[in-house]
Image (cartoon, grey):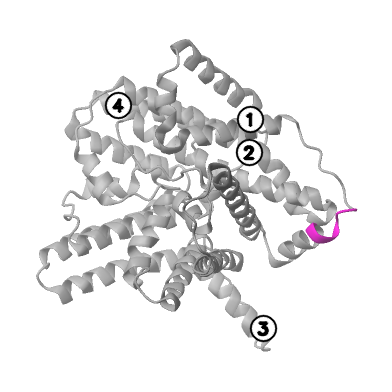
């Protein structure tokens, strides 16, 4: 069930109404049933895979708490849980990739092998795998009590607003909220609906309309001139951001309708002044997951530079592989890691001045933002490309086609959509929009909502693009 589907428009109000009609002690049952329905709308049988990881991690948490005084046994349960969960992820996400590369290697050596692996990746597997792992790790560390109610733990993993594309929630936040009694609040309903409207606008009007031109460029880059290749690259930066940000905003709004606060995954990432800053602003729940469960255990930054660089590369390579079982994702992650290391190495040798004037500071900051955005955009081309041949054609056309190739015919409305998106992005950052919007007269607020809803209905792309992060 997609957030931008008629089914979800019907599903969500029913869930909200039932939630507030039911007594508190039965609400989790209804939410669990709703979450199962939501997930099974895609491929019903894959809920069994989700159930396997839920059962393993549920009992692992209880056993780790029971044997908390026996460190060796407690660690054994943690290892069993993580290995089992990762094994499920490997089979469905990476086994085909490994098989294809081994077959190619054997054939290059003259060995006739022709095995195939044809498994469909369950929706949201990478997301709920990491969410489940965060629970067992926190129980192991003693930061979280094991959840004894199997249904509530299942709901923690399966909570429908963030089940398939995040944000990746921690048990200390979401599990606690699932036990709290929620009281009907007009403010929550208002904020929730507002976020859903914004999310639908960003996804359906901005990202999907831009996506049409991105597909034209990437499907046949040799056809277009260099300026259009550059434009296509920048368009993809806004498409993937709008697509994921739109989803996350709808998720925030859906949860807010029933009184739950989930993680805001973005904070104006394209205003970042460095690659490190970008990852503090982009997909925040994933970045902090890797920070807490991979980077810090490896030693973090409290080590010598060479070891720190190794830690960074491990995190970014794993992050790349997490996004997809393909070489372009691994290279994309490694490229971000290398640039992160290079930036820090350069900054070590540049003296920092604290007495710069306001104008100088603005110019320097603008340069840093532009530099980071351009680099991130170049790296996104690795992320979007379908093959190494596609990457070659893209950059070959970028370099060689300044005086050749066709011009892309772009609807002028695209620039209006982008402008509105940028305004919404800045206002939604750090919840500034709520305080700004609440100061407006009611008639002005409702006019804004009406305009956005009207644009969602009339200006949405005829191409119904799936959410990009669904594939992860």
**Foreground: disc 1 or disc 3:** 1
Is residue 399 found inside the magenta-colored segment of the image?
yes
Say which element carries label 3.
Answer: helix
Label 2 close to label 3 by CB (< 8 Å): no
Visible residue check, residue 4: no
Q: Is residue 33 magenta?
A: no
Where does label 3 land, which residue?
Answer: 107
Count residues near mark 4 (Cα–Cα under 10 Å), then give few for <14, some for 14-19, many for 20+: few
Q: In the image, 106: left or right of 194? A: right
* Spatial CA span between label 1 and label 3: 47 Å
Which of the two discs, 4 and 1, sits closer to the camera?
1
Per the rendered image, the range of residues in magenta is 398-403
Residue of label 1:
460
Tell me if 394 is positioned left or right of 270 in this view.
Answer: right
Q: Residue furthest bottom?
A: 110
State the image coordinates of residue 247 (x, y, percent, origin top left): 49, 40
Tell me the quarter of the picture where residue 34 sits: top left
Q: Residue at x 62, y 57 (%)?
A: 375
Q: CA distance from mark 4 to mark 1?
A: 31 Å
Q: Is 181 left or right of 410, judged from the image as shown?
A: left
Query: Which residue is disc 4 drawn over?
Result: 18
Q: Residue drawn 53% across and 45% down? A: 357
Work out whether 283 lies above or below 57.
Answer: above
The answer to whether mark 4 and mark 1 are in CB contact below 8 A is no
């Amino acid at each position: 069930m997609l957030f931008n589907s008629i089914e979800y428009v019907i599903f969500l109000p029913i869930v909200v109404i039932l939630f507030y009609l039911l007594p508190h002690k039965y609400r989790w049952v209804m939410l669990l049933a709703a979450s199962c329905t939501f997930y099974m709308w895609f491929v019903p049988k894959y809920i069994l895979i989700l159930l396997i990881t839920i059962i393993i991690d549920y009992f692992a948490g209880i056993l780790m708490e029971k044997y908390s005084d026996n460190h060796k046994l407690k660690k054994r349960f943690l290892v069993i849980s993580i290995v089992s969960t990762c094994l499920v992820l490997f089979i469905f996400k990476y086994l085909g990739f490994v098989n294809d590369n081994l077959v190619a290697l054997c054939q290059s050596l003259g060995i006739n092998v022709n095995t195939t692996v044809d498994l469909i990746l369950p929706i949201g597997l990478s997301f709920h795998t990491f969410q489940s792992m965060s629970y067992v790790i926190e129980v192991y560390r003693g930061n979280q009590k094991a959840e004894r109610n199997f249904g509530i733990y299942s709901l923690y993993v399966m909570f429908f607003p963030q089940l398939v594309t995040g944000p990746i929630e921690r048990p200390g936040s979401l599990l606690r909220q699932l036990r709290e009694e929620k009281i009907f609040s007009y403010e929550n309903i208002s904020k929730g609906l507002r976020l859903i409207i914004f999310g639908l606008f960003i996804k359906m009007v901005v990202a999907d309309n831009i996506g049409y031109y991105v597909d034209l460029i990437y499907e046949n880059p040799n056809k277009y001139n260099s300026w259009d290749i550059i434009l296509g690259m920048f368009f993809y930066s806004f498409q993937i951001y709008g697509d994921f940000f739109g989803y996350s905003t709808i998720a925030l709004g859906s949860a807010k309708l029933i009184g739950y606060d989930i993680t805001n995954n973005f904070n104006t990432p394209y205003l970042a002044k460095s690659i490190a800053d970008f990852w503090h602003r982009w997909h925040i729940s994933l970045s902090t997951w890797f920070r807490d469960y991979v980077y810090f255990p490896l030693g973090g930054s409290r080590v010598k530079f060479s070891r720190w660089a190794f830690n960074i590369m491990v995190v970014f390579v794993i992050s790349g592989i997490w996004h997809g079982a393909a070489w372009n994702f691994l290279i994309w992650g490694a490229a971000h890691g290398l640039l992160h290391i290079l930036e820090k190495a350069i900054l070590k040798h540049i003296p920092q001045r604290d007495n710069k004037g306001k104008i100088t500071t603005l110019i320097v900051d603008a340069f840093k933002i532009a530099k980071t955005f351009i680099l991130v955009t170049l790296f996104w081309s690795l992320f979007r490309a379908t093959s190494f041949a596609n990457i070659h054609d893209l950059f070959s056309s970028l370099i060689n086609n300044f005086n050749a190739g066709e011009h892309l015919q772009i609807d002028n409305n695209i620039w209006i959509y982008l402008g509105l998106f940028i305004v919404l992005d800045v206002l939604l950052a750090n919840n500034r929009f709520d305080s700004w919007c609440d100061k407006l007269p009611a008639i002005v607020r409702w006019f804004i909502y009406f305009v956005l809803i009207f644009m969602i209905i009339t200006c949405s792309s005829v191409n119904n693009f799936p959410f990009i992060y669904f594939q992860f």
